[in-house]
Amino acid sequence: MCFSAAASFTASALLAGVGAATLAQRPKPKDLPFAAIPIIFAAHQAIEGVIWLSVNGGNAPPNSLVVAYLLIAQILWPAYIPFCVIAMEPKRRRRPALWILLAAGLFVSGALAIILAQHHYTVEAVADGLRYATDHEFERRLLEVYLLAVIAPLFLSRHLYVVAFGAVTLIGAIVTILAFYFAAASVWCFFSGLASVLVYLHVRRARLNGDVSKAST
């Protein structure tokens, strides 16, 4: 599959549909942050589609778009994913590990936010992806903690489709690092976005289980 403006816009449209269907399930307040993930990914892919158009046209993409893309890819997810799982997990025995992962995510988000504020990122098309690059070496050293904060909380969930989302995200990370490391942020976010159909399945299952519980009382 060739990654391009068309691929990003198509993914954005599909994810917007998934996001609308997910929110139409009327998720419980504790599930709402997790339920919003497809909508966030839809916006993310739309932003990258516009960036693709600039790059393909031989122009440097607007810095505001690059910053918006990286705010989601690098700064939002490390803190947002642990927060989502904490909101869904009332059992105290899971909370200590999740709070530690949230602290790790906040550290990564803060460090990458400082790098984003102080350094200029360039964007170029490399093979079938976009490479977002800066001259700051510390950014690469945060990769392991970033992945830990984004993926590990999903495996601590007691919900089947949340764990499945974590598994697909982990597989996507491994494939991306091995085959698309030159454009890791772009390619991994694309695959993770498509995997967020599992978010819909989780919210739908939670609603159906709730309906069954109400019917039995």
Image (cartoon, grey):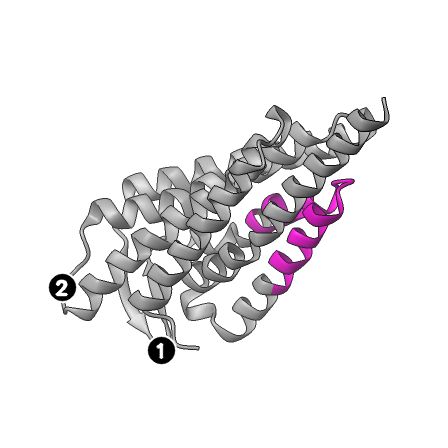
Q: Nearer the viewer, residue 163 or 148?
A: 163
Image coordinates for residue 202, horizontal then vertical, percent: 67, 44
Pick the quarter of the image with the C terminus. top right
Can you say whether 129 is above or below 167 in the image?
A: below
Rendered location of residue 182, percent (x, y): 42, 70
Q: Which portion, as a residue range, is magenta?
A: 146-171
N-term mark: 1 or 2: 2
Q: Quick check: 166 left or right of 65? A: right
Q: Residue furthest top?
A: 217
Res 103 seen here: no
Q: Which is more toward the observer, 137 or 40? A: 40
The residue identified by callout 2 is 59
Residue 127's mark?
A: 1
Q: Quadrant of residue 175?
A: bottom right
Q: Picture coordinates of residue 103 (x, y %)?
A: 60, 32
Q: Amino acid at mark 1?
A: Ala
- What residue lies at 20% left-to-right and 70% top-to-bottom? 56
Residue at horizontal 26 percent and vertical 63 percent from the top: 52
Tell me if mark 1 has few (under 14), some (14-19) or many (20+) residues whose alpha carbon lies within 10 angstroms of its own: few
Location of the N terminus by quadrant is bottom left
Distance (Cα) linking label 1 and label 2: 18 Å
Where 69 falls versus 86 (above or below)? below
Magenta-colored segment: predominant secondary structure = helix
Residue 94 magenta-highlighted? no
The residue shown at (53%, 56%) is: 192
The image quarter containing residue 117 is top left
Q: Is residue 170 magenta?
A: yes
Above or below residue 102? Residue 171 is below
